[in-house]
Image: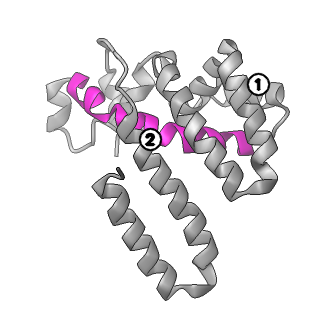
Amino acid sequence: MPSTRATDKKKALTEMAKRLDPFHEIIDRFGLLLTEQAEIRDTLEPAELGKFVVEEERFLNGEPLTSFLDSDQFAESFRKAASGVWPLLGMTFPTLSETLSGLEKLLENDGPWTSLCLRAVVHGDAEALETAAGQAAVSPDFLLIALRAAYAPCVAAHKQALTALAPVELWRKAYCPVCGS
């Protein structure tokens, strides 16, 4: 059963598509992705994140809470999210289907590659992104788009766990303790 948020997003996208007819196909494609991400998010179990130390100066300079975690803690939910998002992206953009299928196989079978991908998307590690892209024989930009599409429902599913672990004093700041904004 689709979540209420997914239904609301779908309605908003339908209304936008009606007003912007030339962009109808693009809006429909990304509407499918947003709906799938919301549905996947609702099925993911939050990982046991444990305690982590937030360096206040880094946090207040805009680093998200996830930057203080071991990115491999997201591996299981990331794999599940990617297994739902990447096939949909492949159907939505058929020319990317084979490449996305290859990425999914790597994610399932290559733990070190998965760790590189998670370091790239969770911590913004550019070197890990370059290495992972090279190993997958894809451009870093393409890989980052694919990783972010799968990571979005994953981090959203962990939002409550992340905010619960944030030190109380951080909530009194003028910054969001989840994303740093």
**Image: 44 above or below 7:** above
SS at circle 1: helix
Name the spot of residue 60 as percent of width and height, x first.
32, 35
* Lateral position of residue 157 relative to residue 70, left or right: left
Task: Give the alpha-carbon distance from disc 2 to disc 1, as whole Å.
Answer: 28 Å
Instruction: Identify the residue at image location x=73%, y=32%.
Output: 103
Q: Identify residue type, mark 1.
A: Thr
Point out the residue furthest to the right here: 137
Q: How many marks?
A: 2
Q: Which mark is residue 131?
A: 1
Determine whether 23 is above or below 30 in the image: below
Picture quadrant of residue 45 = top left
Q: Position of residue 32 (x, y in %)?
A: 53, 59
Q: Is residue 51 above or below residue 84?
A: above
Q: Is residue 127 visible?
A: no
Residue at the spot x=38%, y=72% of the render?
Answer: 12
Residue 173, image quadrant: top left
Which residues are drawn in magenta? 139-166
Crowd around label 1: few <14 · some 14–19 · many ≥20 (10 Å): some
The answer to whether residue 148 is magenta is yes
Relative to the observer, which residue lies in front, 116 or 94?
Answer: 94
Q: Residue shown at 41%/27% (left/top)?
A: 66
Mark number displayed over residue 40: 2
Secondary structure predominantly adopted by residues drawn in magenta: helix
Quadrant of the rendered image containing residue 167: top left
Residues at discs 2 and 1 in contact (Cβ within 8 Å)? no
